[in-house]
Image (tube, helix red, strand yellow):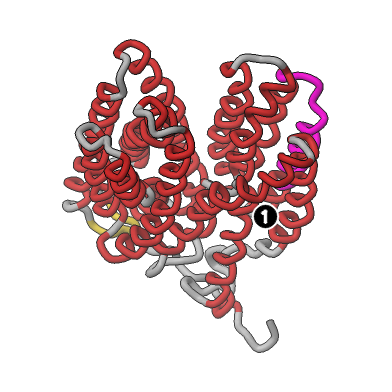
């Protein structure tokens, strides 16, 4: 770094910021395995331990709860000590978690390891990582946050494919052992490459954070609205994502078709996240999120009358394009309207709400199906929750139009 000034190194939207974004994307893609691996091995786990489908699903439930808790806990941690220490601890916990899970003697031990080590460990590569990268960008913050958030979807697209050959030949335990080793070998060095922190106020080369807008609401009130919005949008989002495979099976199209539609949602979701990032840099996070939420509601509505095979592929692609950019927009809104020093904690709280929304919505849709024998009412339930999100964001949009910029 000879010949460069401290101001150059730490400039917002500078060369180092983009280098850090690339490293963060790689870290998120690797760490995202914590959310997806347990889904892929579920059939083998069920067969080996001799439990029913509900019992075999407990490790996934524990993983999501650990992921939700980790986003808040680690978010608060990075606000105090920076990103690298929490990231290192999480990488080690994730790698050791997969190794210990491979040695689990029972479904109970596997469930505990998934929640306490794998779920919490993988959390640092989502909400806290997004909050961290937001500190390094101003003009291009939207696309930077969206790019970092794509790591989660890339993990969902890449890790299951990478795992399949090993699952067929070696079994889930050896596959888990290999994942743990890969995480330790790759993620620890990547974390160490993110050891820099933005210069503190008063230091040489200090770059003042961008101003936030005073919209006449306390940070706590804004946080509550974002939590309500996050819960509502993800209860709605979970209906197709959790049940599209079962829905296709009920319609007689088969499980494989449903899995293809789920992959299509994730692929178009990546496109949506990047496009939403570009849009947020131009019109702001609230307007971008509101557009995505309205389009998500319309896509859910289209699922009800259009249940032909070709139509479902089209609607699933539309749904992915609508919903993919919603969650990253919450981090953008936090940075636009709330203090930068609290970004990790506040982003973590909203991400926790979205995860709980996914869990609640998946269960609610199944319950409604059991009561009615059809997914039509479940889609309507999702639309109703989506309206909760639209209402909360419309209120924030109205208040933001009356705001003014103040010091961060």
Q: Is residue 291 above or below residue 355?
A: below
Tell me which segment is drawn in magenta.
91-107
Q: Quadrant of residue 254?
A: top left
Tell me residue 398's x, y (percent).
17, 46
In the drawing, does residue 75 fall left or right of residue 322? Answer: right
Q: Residue furthest front?
A: 252
Residue bearing the label numbered 1: 84
Q: Nearer the viewer, residue 288 or 40?
A: 40
Question: Is residue 105 one of those drawn in magenta?
Answer: yes
Tell me residue 204's x, y (percent).
58, 74
Q: Residue furthest top?
A: 371
In the drawing, does residue 73 fall left or right of residue 134? Answer: right
Q: Nearer the viewer, residue 148 or 198?
A: 148
Tell me residue 5's x, y (percent).
60, 82
Q: Residue at x 24, y 46 (%)?
A: 295
Q: Residue at x 57, y 17 (%)?
A: 54
Question: Is residue 252 one of those drawn in magenta?
Answer: no
Q: Main secondary structure of the magenta part?
A: helix
Q: Residues within 10 Å of mark 1 (few under 14, many from 20)?
A: many
Q: Does any portion of residue 96 appear in the rendered image?
A: no
The quarter in which the C terminus is drawn is bottom left
In the drawing, does residue 229 fall left or right of residue 19? Answer: left
Q: Nearer the viewer, residue 244 or 23?
A: 244
Tell me residue 94's x, y (percent).
71, 42
Q: Residue at x 82, y 30 (%)?
A: 103
Q: Does any portion of residue 98 appear in the rendered image?
A: yes
The quarter in which the N terminus is drawn is bottom right
Q: Is residue 30 above or below residue 107?
A: below
Q: Nearer the viewer, residue 165 or 303?
A: 165
- Secondary structure state at the residue bearing disc 1: helix
Q: Residue at x 43, y 21 (%)?
A: 363
């Amino acid at each position: 770094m000879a010949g460069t000034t401290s101001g150059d190194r730490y400039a917002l939207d500078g060369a180092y910021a983009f280098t850090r974004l690339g490293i963060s994307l790689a870290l998120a893609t690797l760490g995202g395995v914590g959310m997806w691996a347990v889904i892929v091995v579920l059939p083998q786990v069920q067969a080996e331990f001799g439990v029913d489908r509900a019992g075999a699903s407990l490790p996934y439930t524990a993983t999501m709860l650990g992921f939700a808790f980790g986003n808040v806990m680690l978010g608060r941690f990075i606000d105090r000590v920076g990103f690298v220490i929490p990231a290192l601890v999480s990488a080690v916990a994730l790698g050791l978690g997969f190794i210990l899970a491979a040695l689990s003697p029972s479904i109970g031990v596997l469930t505990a390891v998934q929640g306490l080590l794998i779920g919490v460990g993988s959390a640092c590569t989502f909400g806290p990582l997004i909050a961290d990268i937001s500190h390094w960008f101003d003009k291009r913050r939207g696309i930077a946050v969206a790019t970092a958030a794509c790591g989660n979807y890339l993990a969902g697209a890449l890790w299951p494919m990478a795992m399949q050959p090993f699952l067929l030949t070696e079994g889930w335990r050896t596959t888990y052992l290999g994942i743990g080793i890969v995480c330790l070998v790759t993620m620890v060095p990547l974390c160490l490459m993110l050891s820099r922190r933005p210069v503190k106020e008063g230091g040489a080369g200090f770059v003042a954070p961008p101003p936030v807008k005073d919209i006449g609401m306390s940070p706590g009130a804004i946080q509550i609205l974002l939590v309500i919005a996050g819960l509502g949008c993800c209860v709605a989002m979970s209906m197709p994502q959790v049940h599209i495979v079962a829905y296709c099976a009920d319609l007689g199209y088969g499980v494989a078709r449903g899995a293809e539609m789920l992959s299509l949602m994730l692929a178009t979701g990546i496109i949506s996240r990047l496009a939403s990032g570009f849009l947020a840099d131009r019109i702001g996070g609230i307007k971008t999120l509101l557009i995505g939420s309205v389009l998500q509601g319309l896509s859910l509505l289209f699922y009800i009358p259009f249940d032909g095979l070709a139509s479902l592929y089209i609607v699933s692609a539309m749904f992915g394009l609508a919903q993919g950019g919603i969650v990253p927009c919450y981090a953008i809104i936090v940075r636009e309207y709330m203090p930068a020093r609290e970004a990790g904690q506040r982003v973590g709280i909203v991400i926790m709400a979205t995860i709980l929304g996914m869990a609640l919505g998946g269960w609610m849709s199944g319950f409604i199906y059991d009561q009615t024998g059809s997914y039509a009412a479940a889609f309507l339930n999702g639309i109703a929750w989506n309206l909760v999100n639209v209402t909360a964001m419309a209120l924030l949009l109205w208040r933001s139009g009356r705001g003014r910029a103040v010091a961060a």
